[in-house]
Amino acid sequence: MAHKILVALDASEGAWRAVEYVARTFGQTPGVEVTLMHILTGLPPAFWDDGHILEDKEREARQRLIAQWQADQEKNWQGLLAKAKESLAAAGIPAAAVAGKFKPKYYDVAEDIINEAVSAGCSTVVMGRRGLGKAKALLLGSVTTKVVQNARGCAVTIV
């Protein structure tokens, strides 16, 4: 039976600690399967409707900008994914055992992580915690807290 692990991945230091943890802990584990998942959060405020009715040209221009922003986000994700896969492969996890998922936010990030873990049959979710200073070391981010509090059917490891 495969040990399925979901790693919530973004460009944060905590997410990279999570990838390194999975590499160290499961690098030589036969049958391990890792899913690296990034949730694309909502559009930046610059793309929000500013209250006036857009003319066709304005709407088309905004749609092009949004499409370009989304393409840039996916390109950045592909770079993160490649770096994470390289780290896992160096630890002994075969490339075929590592999948990447780039999804737009559906509910909220925490709920989307939980839903993915459940639907994929993951036994473990691994996430980084936020905070760099000693005082912040005791704090978890809101997404991390929600996943810890609401996860069902799997272990949650916070790195």
Image (spheres, rainbow, N blue to C red):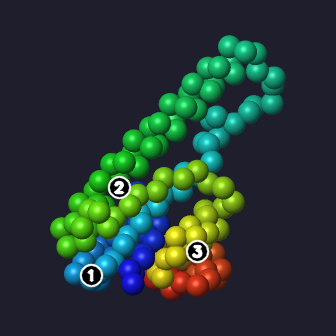
Q: Which mark is residue 118?
A: 3
Residue pointed to by mark 1: 30
How far apart are labels 2 and 3 at the CA level?
22 Å
Q: Amino acid at mark 2?
A: Leu
Q: In 3D space, how far apart are the residues under numbered discs 1 and 2 (Cα atoms)?
A: 22 Å
Q: Position of residue 105 (x, y in %)?
A: 62, 54
Against 10, is 27 above or below? below
Q: CA distance from mark 1 to mark 3?
A: 22 Å
Q: Which mark is residue 81?
A: 2
Amino acid type, callout 1? Pro
Is 7 drawn above or below residue 81 in the view shown? below
CB-based contact (under 8 Å), mark 1 and mark 3: no
Query: Splitting the image into 4 quarters, where does residue 87 fall?
Result: bottom left
Q: Are there few (<14), some (14-19), or many (20+) residues within 10 Å of tag 2?
A: many
Image coordinates of residue 13 in percent, x first then y, are 38, 65
Q: Looking at the image, tell me whether mark 1 or mark 3 is earlier in sequence order.
A: 1
Quadrant hosting residue 67: top right
Element type at mark 3: helix
Q: Where residue 74 sits: x, y (%)?
A: 45, 43
Residue 149 falls left or right of residue 70: right
Position of residue 141 measured from the top left corner of the image (x, y, whole percent) = 56, 72
Q: Amino acid at mark 3?
A: Val
Q: Quadrant of residue 12?
A: bottom left
Q: The residue tagged with tag 2: helix, strand or loop?
A: helix
> What secondary structure is marked by label 1?
loop
Q: Quadrant of the N terminus?
A: bottom left
